[in-house]
Image: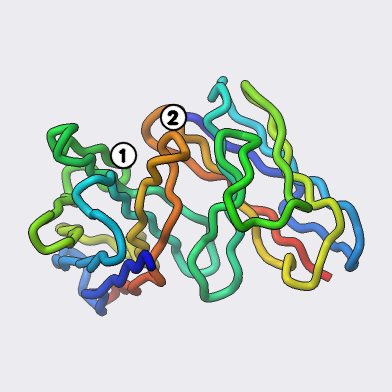
Amino acid sequence: EVQLVESGGDLVQPGGSLRLSCAASGFTFSDHHMDWVRQAPGKGLEWVARTRDRLNSYTTEYAASVKGRFTISRDDSKNSLYLQMNSLKTEDTAVYFCSRVGKDYGGTTDYWGQGTLVTVSS
Amino acid sequence: DIQMTQSPSTLSASVGDRVTITCRASQSVSSWLAWFQQKPGKAPKLLIYKASGLVSGVPSRFSGSGSGTEFTLIIGSLQPDDFATYYCQQYDSYPLTFGGGTKVEI
């Protein structure tokens, strides 16, 4: 069974940093691209970042709203995905979901974790 | 960036109704369009991929159609479990973008 479990969400002050983690199990993690998607309270979904797999040299993509502040990374030996968030702003407050890019769907995500809440406030 | 516009934003319906949700892209995304269902406090669930592909295990009352800039999600006969918010997502180009969501309520 595919499982994605996020952790690391917390209350942080504006300008602060936080590192989110996502532990993956039930599939060959190294074979899949992985995404972070966020959802501000009461709002819609916003794609944040993608890391591709080893065959694609772990290249990354970012939303403009986080580029230069957030860094997505992965450790295939630990089946883990990370999101390093720096220079946090109040508008970064959201539930952050880790998600797997499916092999059969052409580039969208087929499994999601339950999310971890990041609150940026003074 | 490609803007995705869903309509309506809220839809009131009854069990057994046929429900249609529309998603428009600001430029062509070919058929690289997905539909997700999300219930309160839960993660989104993939329903439809590549505009019309039904994900395994998703009931056949869900169907998707369209290409280019106009897409439709149809729920053939609304069931109690279908009351949720639905999002379209284009994955033709980066940044990936979602529509604003359509809340299907009683």
Q: Which amino acid, by three-letter code, is at mark 2?
A: Asp
Check if mark 1 and mark 2 are on a common chain.
Answer: no
Image quarter for residue B1?
Answer: top left
User: Which quadrant of the rendered structure holds the N terminus of chain A?
Assistant: bottom left
The foreground one among A48 and A111 is A111
Tally the numbered discs.
2
How busy is the neighbourhood of tag 1: few (under 14 within 10 Å), some, or many (20 plus)? few
User: Disc 1 sits on a residue from what chain?
Assistant: A
Q: Which label was assigned to residue B1?
A: 2
Residue at 58% over, 52% down: B56
Relative to B84, is A65 on the left or the right?
left
How busy is the neighbourhood of tag 2: few (under 14 within 10 Å), some, or many (20 plus)? few
Image quarter for residue B10?
Answer: bottom right
Q: Where in the figure is residue A114, as x and y percent of width and height?
A: 41, 72
Relative to A16, is A109 on the left or the right?
right
Residue at 37% over, 63% down: A97
Relative to A108, is A7 on the left or the right?
left
- Asked if residue B100 shows in the view, the reply is no
Q: CA distance from mark 1 to mark 2?
A: 9 Å
Tag 1 residue: A64
User: Which quadrant of the rendered structure holds the C terminus of chain A?
Assistant: bottom left
Contact, mark 1 vs mark 2 (Cβ under 8 Å): yes
Q: Is residue A80 above or below residue B35?
A: below
In the structure shown, which secondary structural element does the residue marked by tag 1 occupy? loop
